[in-house]
Amino acid sequence: MSDLLFEARGVEVTYGQSKGLFGHGRPGVRVLHGVDLAIRRGETVGIVGESGSGKTTLGRALLKLVPVSGGAIRFDGQDITNLSADAMRPLRRRMQMIFQDPMASLNPRHSIRQILTEPLILHGLATDRRDAERQVRAILDRVSLPPVTLDRAPHELSGGQRQRIGIARAVLMKPDFVLADEVVSGLDVSTQAQVLNILKALSQEMGLAMAFISHDLSVIRAVCDRVTVMRFGEVVEEGPCETVFDAPQSHYTRLLLDAIPLPEIDDGWLTRPAPSLENAA
Amino acid sequence: MTQSLVAIEGLSAISTRDGGAPVLRDVSLTLEKGEVRGLVGESGAGKSTIAKALLGILPSTVKVTGGFIRFEGRDLLAMPRRELSDLMGREITLIPQDPQTALNPARRIEAQLTDGLRLKLGMGKAAAHERALQLLDEVQIRNPERVLAAYPHELSGGMRQRILIASAFALNPKLVVADEPTTALDVTVQKEILRLIRRMQEAHGTAVIFVTHDLGVVAKICDRVTLLYAGKVIEDGATAGMLTAPKHIYTSALIAAGPRYDRPNAGLEPVPEAVFRQLRAEIGIAERRV
């Protein structure tokens, strides 16, 4: 068994392309230009970039949530690039997602109990309702939420609590891989720290591999083993966090790091010229 | 002692929608001429409510129950509507949070940038055009003629934010209220915008109220800072002092909660429940139900 769980090679994604009736199609806009990415079992890989860098598209392409127009994606040794939706179905449970806004992904009419137990029964991961309830209570405790949460509706929870439900729902499926897209962007720092700690601990305990997409390099450093820096749909730099953060090779990575305001006094920071973008790799 | 530009004294307000829940609790702070003062806190801290009160745009669901806001000695809360509307947009202006929605999509930049110049200063069309070009140059927009003729959707977020900064400083106001002006921007653009606000503020001698949730941004642009929690001032003072020797345990807990790319093993300590308990006890908030 290979130690690689996800492997993307030369992935291209084009939006808005159409064939047209007589071959006069629209060419579309290419947003990923041949991206390589490797995620080992149990490893958390950060994907960072500014708006328009293609980081979200790359995450979606891995899960085949957007059509891939070039390159190849392998999951657990299997080429999934051209798998049909039917053929993908058995793999879906093994790849879960946590979104930026959990409110948008939780059915507002369902109780948290329904939201968490039903997928367990649907996927045959629980023998009966009682077993499902037992598993759900265990995971709730793991994400530091009291059992009464089960009787609540999503809108009755705070942003941080909802995000912990999002995490609970994803890990209940016992996945091998979780895609976490900007999962703490909408949260206050005090809540953010708790959500990140839970996510980090669970991924370690369960041996989860994770693609952690964020625009925030400080958050990436706190939870990831490796990092991929993207810009304009291409990988600018990739490597273990220590290397990329402590000795960035790419000009663009240095520019990004320099732009982060750290909570300490540095009088020259504002006026100091940024590393020039013209020579950015 | 000379008079402060802004003196907020004992300002209290409640939300009429939320069963009369307090949104500001006896807030006092002063702002001197030409200084940048941060208002920082997490959601629900009341930082935006203070900003809105300064601009005279409190939502109808917020009711002031006590206190004063003095601007050059004049009480903004008791000021007749006409006098207030004369002051707003001229001596007190706003840099809004979201450059995507703050500009009218159906009007060209020139029309939006010259409104104030023409209405408040009575400039003619040609003079306003010249002044608009100067302003765009001041915020380092390279081809100002083209930008003036453009509609907002034709410009990037960073460019729109520059235009809104130009517009905020156009009438040489005494106070600019910047309400999370960089929250929606990428970090590299954020840095340019922070630099620009600081430069404009220094060049015009303007005082700035800078609302943000980011202590990093506070560190880089604010001279003094007020930290709020649940509508109450928790700590107030020079930025350097608060960051290096915080007086309140909540301040140090917030600093420790933020991850830092340069210190992988520090940060990410959730604010302990005990700190929130202490805050609630100090402020006099009932323990919350789960």
Image (cartoon, grey):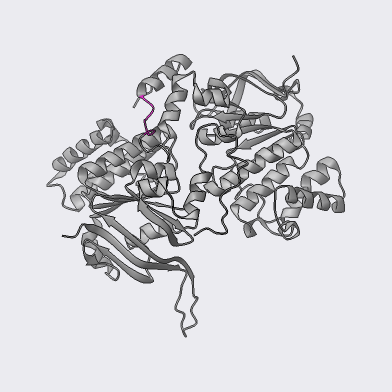
Q: Nearer the viewer, residue B75 or B16?
A: B75
Determine whether, in the image, residue B133 is placed left or right of residue A71.
Answer: right
Determine whether, in the image, residue A199 is placed left or right of residue A55.
Answer: left
Asked where in the image residue B275 lies, by quadrant, the reply is: top left
Residue drawn at the location 52% of the way across and 39% of the way down: A261
Residue range (magenta): B266-272
Determine whether, in the image, residue B126 is placed left or right of residue B193.
Answer: right
Question: What number of labels is visible?
Answer: 0
Check the image and name the residue furthest to the bottom: A22
Residue drawn at the location 22% of the way across and 66% of the way down: A78
Residue A215 in percent (x, y) is at 45, 48
Residue B51 in percent (x, y) is at 62, 31
Check the image and name the residue furthest to the left: A127
Vertical order, B20 against A182 (above or below) = above
Vertical order, B30 against A113 (above or below) = above
Task: Answer yes or no: is residue B230 visible.
Answer: no
Vertical order, A273 against A83 (above or below) = above
Residue B137 in percent (x, y) is at 74, 51
Q: Is residue B84 magenta?
A: no
Determine whether, in the image, residue B209 is placed left or right of residue A182.
Answer: right
Q: Nearer the viewer, residue B208 or B21?
A: B208
Q: Nearer the viewer, residue B140 or B148?
A: B140
Asked where in the image residue A218 lies, by quadrant, the reply is: top left
Asked where in the image residue B46 lies, by quadrant, the reply is: top right
Task: Answer yes or no: is residue B251 visible.
Answer: yes
Residue drawn at the location 23% of the way across and 55% of the way down: A93
Q: Is residue B269 magenta?
A: yes
- Where, quadrant-wise, is the N terminus of chain A in this rendering? bottom left
Q: Main secondary structure of the magenta part?
A: loop
